[in-house]
Amino acid sequence: VSSVLYLSLECVGLRDEASDTVASDIGVGLGILTALRSTGFRAIQGEFSIPSDVASKHSVSMDTLWKAWDASISPDDTENKKEAVASKEALHSAAREMADMASFHLHRARDNQSAVPKEGRPCLLPAVCGLQYLDSLREFDYDVLHPSLVGGGDNVTGPERRRRLGLMFLLGRTWLTGTF
């Protein structure tokens, strides 16, 4: 992600260390969030998107992921409920740690964005989407498998519609003000 941001900055004629540092922080934060967002999809493909050190620290495995998935899809299923809840909690704590890492990088980029010249600020718009996804993760207690975060389908609920409109508002505000 960082390399695309570097390229965007270079396309507007910016190639300085301060801008690259902000782009790097945004890229790292968005990369971590992309791994979180893809958890469900990659699990279906038989892949695991949580880094091994975080997974082992929180005792998360593919089996844990599947049990958490089942708990998210049918929370009222009483069979193996205790095990499903434990799996879901382990996944939440791993997701929380990853979200904290992403938040650190995105907020550091936000704090240093004034170092980026005005013509380069539109190149940093992807940070807005990442910050909005972080807010959604917090809202759903870091449940990366929550149906509202996984999305899919054309059946958009009221809260999802508000979240999408809120993102459009934030992107517009960022475009106009030059700050995210």
Image: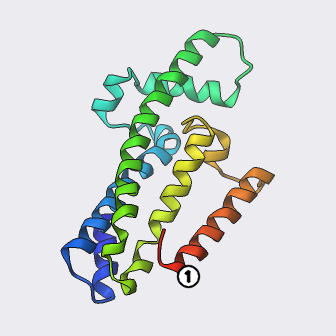
Pointer 1: what residue? 176
Q: Is residue 102 left or right of residue 39?
A: left
Q: Is residue 116 left or right of residue 149?
A: left
Q: Nearer the viewer, residue 167 or 64?
A: 167
Q: Looking at the image, can residue 135 be seen?
A: yes
Vertical arrangement, residue 87 with respect to residue 110, above or below: above
The quarter of the picture where residue 139 lies is top right
The quarter of the picture where residue 9 lies is bottom left
What number of labels is visible?
1
Q: Nearer the viewer, residue 135 or 2?
A: 135
Quarter in which the N terminus is drawn: bottom left
Q: Residue 5 location, x and y as percent? A: 33, 72
Q: Nearer the viewer, residue 79 or 156?
A: 156
Vertical arrangement, residue 30 with respect to residue 11, above or below: above
Q: Looking at the image, can residue 49 be seen?
A: no
Check disc 1 and report its element: helix, strand or loop.
Answer: helix
Colouring style: rainbow
The residue at the point 57 percent across, 71 percent down is 171
The residue at the point 59 percent across, 74 percent down is 173
Q: Amino acid at mark 1?
A: Leu
Q: Residue 137 location, x and y as percent? A: 56, 43
Q: Residue 60 location, x and y as percent? A: 41, 24
The residue at the point 42 percent across, 49 percent down is 103
- Looking at this rendering, what residue extends furthest in the bottom direction? 13
Vertical arrangement, residue 38 with respect to residue 91, above or below: below
- Looking at this rendering, what residue extends furthest in the left direction? 17
The residue at the point 66 percent across, 52 percent down is 152
Q: Residues within 10 Å of mark 1 (few under 14, many from 20)?
A: few
Q: Is residue 105 left or right of residue 137?
A: left
